[in-house]
Image: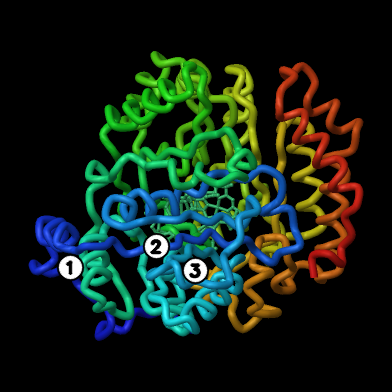
Amino acid sequence: MQTDQPEAILSTVSATYSEEHLKQLASERKSRKKWLLVQPTSNTSMMVDSGTVSMPLNLIMVSTLAGELFDVTFIDERIGDSVPEDLSGYDIVAITSRTLNASKAYAIGDAALAQDKTVILGGVHPTMLHEEAREHCTSVVYGEIESVWTELATDVILGNMKDVYRAETLKPMTAMQRPDFTHALDSKYSKKYSALIPILATKGCPVGCNFCTTPTIYGKSHRSREIELVLDEMHYHQDRLGKKNVSFSFMDDNISFKPKFFIELLEEMAKIGARWNANISMNFLHKPEIAELAGRSGCDLMSIGFESLNPETLKSVHKGSNRLDNYEKVVSNLHKNGVAIQGYFMFGFDNDSEESFQMTYDFIMKNQIEFPVFSLVTPFPGTPYFDEMKPRLRHFDWDKYDTYHYMFEPTGMSGEKLLENFVKLQREVYKGRAIMKRMKGKPLNWVWFVNYMMHRFTKKLKPEIYL
Ligand code: B12
Ligand code: SF4
């Protein structure tokens, strides 16, 4: 496994790759090359890819660009589409991959290479481990496709592929095209997609948590789109669906990182009647006026990475945006404004003890967190945390890198105790009585349904399934 970038194989966007040249090349061709785009499912036994799944904005961005110059077929294995065994109808097979579905992505890549197809791998995992990924494809795309598209598409047309495509500079987000959902929605299984429409306003996050891949891929950058473009996209979907209260899900790494931008965006969104949810960092949510604005602008749910109630743990992962003394304030401000909370909590850190579980339970119950989500600490390849923990990791089986598998023995307790308490906490929080207590006074909506599903799921949990 390799996380460094050998300079020799990194390509640079040179002057010979211009958009004009690309358009000219494409128009000169008599037939368009045919791309098969694949979102592989994972082999994980957990609930990650089950039920309704979100539309994959990553691959949709690939189809948006590729669809302009090439013929595109979009396959999402998570909703029931399958990759054809005979790939003779395609020239290019382009696959997206995170760590949890890397082995599936590699198998598809191998099969396509065996049929002499040009195979392109992109997404977080191939970016982080491009040398490993390169064994299963023709070319790896490092990071976002937008910033290398001109070069990649030109080489595809000329049949002159490089090992790795990596941009020297990232394109401004204002140059980002509006995602075209048509290829994704062509599937006869598209009803399995969640009704939430994925959207992006910003990219990147300079906070620098040591377990997160974003700082490695995008560094300290935090780019944003023009607010007008975000609103145009929302209006487009409102018109397409013939209603105002369309629900959007922001895919941003940290949408609130630049408060001025975030406040302006929300003020504008408050005027259009849409609903939204987002992953959010707590850096300024303790201010009552921000929570008020979030509620007024149509926010139904905020996903907040509380991660841990242990100050030592927060310090050890460099999660500087989380201040423990703000936790309760953030929750009550959001609740006062009708915003539900999906709270993420991680276990298995060296500083965790049995007491950490009790503290988390008390916090969740006292503060009526509507949708608590628990995961086991997972050092993802390419992160500083992975490098630090590598000698202690129990395995490198990517199928189990889904944040629901036991990765290493923490110094504060045995692995057995960790899993026992992890299961117990989930069961306790999703017991009928606990749900009634947490959800008391909350509107009757899909969050109740999620709790009901979690109640059924957690009843069956056993420590062994996390091994
Ligand atoms: C929003 C989000 C979610 C959402 C939506 C996920 C979804 N279905 O897309 C939810 C909350 C559901 C979610 C769930 C999970 N997530 Co998440 N999520 C994100 C987040 C913040 C943004 C993803 C996104 O859509 N970005 C916007 C798109 C447009 O950008 P992009 O994904 O980077 O894609 C670009 C490039 O990668 C490239 N590209 C991508 N694919 C391809 C393919 C080809 C062929 C090419 C050429 C280029 C290319 O071009 C794309 C367009 O610019 C990322 C962080 C991140 N920046 O990646 C974490 C992240 C992807 N999630 C992560 C994890 C761990 C999870 C979960 C396992 C958590 C859990 N326990 O539930 C699940 C797994 C879900 C799944 N089945 O994959 C990790 C994955 C780490 C890893 N190495 O795999 C990330 C990277 C965060 C982290 N910890 O570092 N997630
Ligand atoms: S705040 Fe979130 S997106 Fe930013 S570095 Fe930390 S985990 Fe990654």
Classed neighbour count for the residue bearing mark 2: other residues with Cα under 10 Å, few (<14), some (14–19), many (≥20): many
For marks 3 and 2 on the same chain, the one whose residue lies earlier in the sequence: 2
The residue that label 2 is drawn on is 35
Q: Nearer the viewer, residue 453 or 68?
A: 68
Mark 3 element type:
helix
Which amino acid does the dot numbered 2 rest on?
Answer: Trp
Instruction: Estimate how packed mark 3 is, as few (under 14), some (14 to 19) or many (20 or more) residues with alpha carbons within 10 Å.
Output: many
Amino acid carrying label 3: it is His
Give left or right: position of 160 versus 43: left
Query: Of the residues under marks 3 and 1, which one precedes in the sequence?
Result: 1
Whether the residue under disc 3 has CB within 8 Å of ligand 1: yes
Q: Nearer the viewer, mark 1 or mark 2?
A: 2
- Spot occupied by residue 370 in the image (x, y as percentages of width and height): 72, 31
Pointers 3 and 2 in contact (C-beta within 8 Å): no
Residue under the point 44% across and 47% down: 183
- Where residue 373 sits: x, y (%)? 70, 45
Q: Secondary structure at mark 1?
A: loop
- From this view, report whether residue 82 is shown above or below residue 322: below
Q: Nearer the viewer, residue 94 or 383?
A: 94
- 9 versus 232 height, above or below: below
The residue wearing badge 1 is 13
- Identify the element where label 2 is drawn: strand
Q: How many marks?
A: 3
Report, in whole angstroms, how far the alpha carbon at label 3 lies from the one at label 2.
Answer: 21 Å
For the point 53% across and 44% down, the residue is 55
Name the residue beneath numbered marker 3: 125
